[in-house]
Image (spheres, coloured by chain):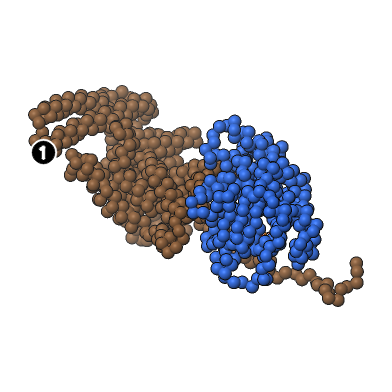
Chain colours: A blue, B brown
Amino acid sequence: MAAFGPSTAQPAPGAPEIHAAVANEEAVLDIDGFSLWYGAARALWDISMRIPRGKVTALIGPSGCGKSTLLRSVNRLNDLIDGVRIEGDMRLNGDSIYDRAVDVIELRKRMGMVFQKSNPFPMSIYENVVYPLRIDGVTDKRVLDEVCERSLRGAAIWDEVKDRLQTSGLSLSGGQQQRLCIARAIAAEPEVLLMDEPCSALDPIATGRVEDLIADLKGSYTVLIVTHNMQQASRSSDYTAFMYLGRLVEYGPTDDIFMRPHRKETEDYVSGRFG
Amino acid sequence: MSAPDPKHPARRVRALSLFAVGEPWIWLTNAALVLCVSMIVGLVGLVLVEGASTFWPTDGVRLRLLDGSVVIGEVTRSELHAPTDVAIREQVGEAHVAQAREKIAAAGGEARRDLVRIGNYEVTGEHFRWVSDFNVAERGAPKDLVVFERVTWGRFYGTPVRFERAGVKTADGTEDAWRAFEEAHPGCRERLETRRRLERVDLGRVNHALSEARLTLRRAEIRAGGVASEADQAAWRTRTAELEAEATRIRDRIVAIDKENDGWVVIMRIADGKEVPIRVADVVRAYRPNTLDTAGRLGVLVSRWREFLLDEPREANSEGGVWPAIFGTVVMTLLMSIVVVPIGVLAALYLREYAKAGVVTSSVRIAVNNLAGVPSIVFGVFGLGFFCYTVGASIDQLLFAEKLPNPTFGTGGILWSALTLALMTLPVVIVATEEALAAVPSSMREGSYACGASKWQTIRRIVLPKALPGIMTGAILAMARGAGEVAPLMLVGAVKLAPELPVDGIFPYVHFERSFMHLGFHVYDLGFQSPNSEAAKPMVYTTTLLLILVIVTLNLAAIRIRTSLRRRYAGGQF
Ligand SMILES: Nc1ncnc2c1ncn2[C@@H]1O[C@H](COP(=O)(O)OP(=O)(O)OP(=O)(O)O)[C@@H](O)[C@H]1O
Ligand SMILES: [Mg+2]
């Protein structure tokens, strides 16, 4: 497969180390030999991994290794970027994501996404949160109010904004904006929650509450979270995947990845000796 | 602290050079700003000062010249000059040359000359006259001097002598005559106003109905292919007879009013001692400038501004008001904005959001940008050829066949003017909108797509609201450009004197086909086409001031909308 991409100087790809425990889980998302090019530059190399249902899976790896790219491929946000080309496929509950017949809009509605950089909309806090419902045509004020409060509570920001729901979302502080975006992502109760470093702009208390949120969501939702924070990965995720230079290196239960990694690179990275 | 590190010797802090600090650049930018501001302040200041002082009533003067003749009027401006021998002789006559020379010598060789507005055009044949001070034997400001502003013939200066009512003297002497005039004036003006209404509104309606009846007959003729049926003709005859009768009734009333007004006359003595009868009804405004205190002057000022803003022009536009021009400017500008903003925004939306980037898109963009550089008169020519003579003529063929060969839409009009200017300002709106759309961060769009929004939902709910202030800026610029534009309007519908406003009480109330008056065109007309250019000159400034005020008002309204939009959607980031 990789033969189609422009060959760049890459270390000889060893097959990824996938722990047996992952294979026993029921997968909600099945990534199957997925590669991605930005124009001529290849960002993902033949990634195959199964994301277990109802569990939290963390993606870790050094900056620029393709974590965001992989996450954005799951809800096909990379479609919007000119010159992106993919190979391989992903399946959500067995249905292809990249099939021609797929309704991308329906697909995205089943997923929520929190971005690395907060991106509230130019509207009130209230409207920001209920945006996914609005575009679905929900107008029942009771439903909207309820969703708004539940989501804001879930994102640990309710107490701060409950008295000014009608002010602009852009008037919040950076960390508040990020939590607002988290609230928006969980408003429509998605099957899969994609989080790209959701806590990078948050203080320890807010981070703790987001981690609590993730713990609450576990079970009913599947969470795929990118993080640079090893403690966070080890605390709140069930499975961890380590990526390096666009490749999946090792993927297994979080405890194993952190305590008993099979690969040297993984061990170096999680122990902070990477470099 | 510690011993010096040999690898990193302590560096001495050197003073930064002047250029590194950037001081000269600050001066340069500052100088540029000062230059811009002083040019703008100079222009606006001139317009403001000249425009605001136009209506202030000045003192009346009575000048007895060396040869014994008398000049009365108002001094409008003065200048110094060094008179030549010939000029002195010409002005004062052989007999007084020596006397004049003495005066000039006493003043240090220079002479002042005043431009005196002498009015009384029907007697003097001129509105203004230069009077040099060496020619003045005696200068006075008589208390009983009266200024009349009249419906026709411009100003009148004189002293009241008697008052007559239906040919019978009712008051004698200056004071009594003036009092009698002041008593009679409001009633006469009221009658004149009634007469004007009868003529404009009632008679206008009858005339309109008459032409409607004729058009109905004409339509019937066209339908029948030549001659209308007997019934149609009979209907037309009865209708016409009815209307003619009504018109006669109205005309009779007008004649009666005229006759009544003819009976109120004040006899005035003018500069050369002659007595001139003035119909009270012909006087728009009367005051005695030399008895006015500040409050009285303010009263005249306010009354003149009122007339200027709310009335129609008279005396070839050099007197009276500019209300039709204000109305025309505002309606045309709004009409233009209503057309150009939606079209421009939609076009920019397609160009930026939907069109694939490529040669075609770039060419369209370049073409649009170049459209902004086309001289505005070219748009006027295009508007005349395309809108008036092609589109308008076709509309006439289809809908107004009975009026042909008189054009309805097939000639200049407010709609075609608005469309022409819309075309002219389109690039401004498109460019501004494109910029505003491009400035919407892609992270916001991605956030919306990630929520499962379609492209259109994203544009409508995220991109447009975020870009709206920028779009409004474009609309404001377009509006300002359009409101101040004159050249193309001269071809497609602005006229010197429009008989009717584009909006009135006759069905269908809004008449897009009508020609209209425009403040910008009015300025041009006053400044370069007026027969009485001295009197028109101050009006040029006042009208310019008004045009600027109208544009500023329109812009402020738009800016207010933009600010409230900003407040609704924004708040600083972080
Ligand atoms: N829009 C894009 N166009 C071209 N190249 C891109 C684009 N986005 C990312 N890349 C490239 O793809 C590679 C992976 O980027 P990605 O954003 O997925 O990294 P990441 O693992 O999320 O890094 P970080 O931890 O710093 O967020 C990088 O080399 C980057 O330069
Ligand atoms: Mg990233």
Q: Is residue A97 visible?
A: yes
Left or right position of B210 against B318: left
Type of amino acid at the residue the image marks with label 1: Gly
* Quarter of the rendered structure image containing ligand 1: bottom right
Q: Quadrant of the C terminus of chain A?
A: bottom right
State whether residue B103 is above or below residue A180.
below
Above or below: residue B373 compared with residue B143: below
As rendered, which of B134 and B401 lies closer to the eye?
Answer: B401
Give the residue drawn at x 55%, y 50%: A95
Left or right placement of residue B66 versus residue A258 in this view: left
Which x, y percent locates residue B178? 37, 29
- Using the image, name the chain to which the residue with label 1 belongs: B
Q: How far across and how far down the image is residue A75, in percent?
A: 58, 51
Q: Residue at x 60, y 58 (%)?
A: A32
Q: Nearer the viewer, residue A90 or B21?
A: A90
Q: Which residue lies under the disc numbered 1?
A: B225
Q: Is residue B559 left or right of residue B168?
A: right
Q: How many marks?
A: 1
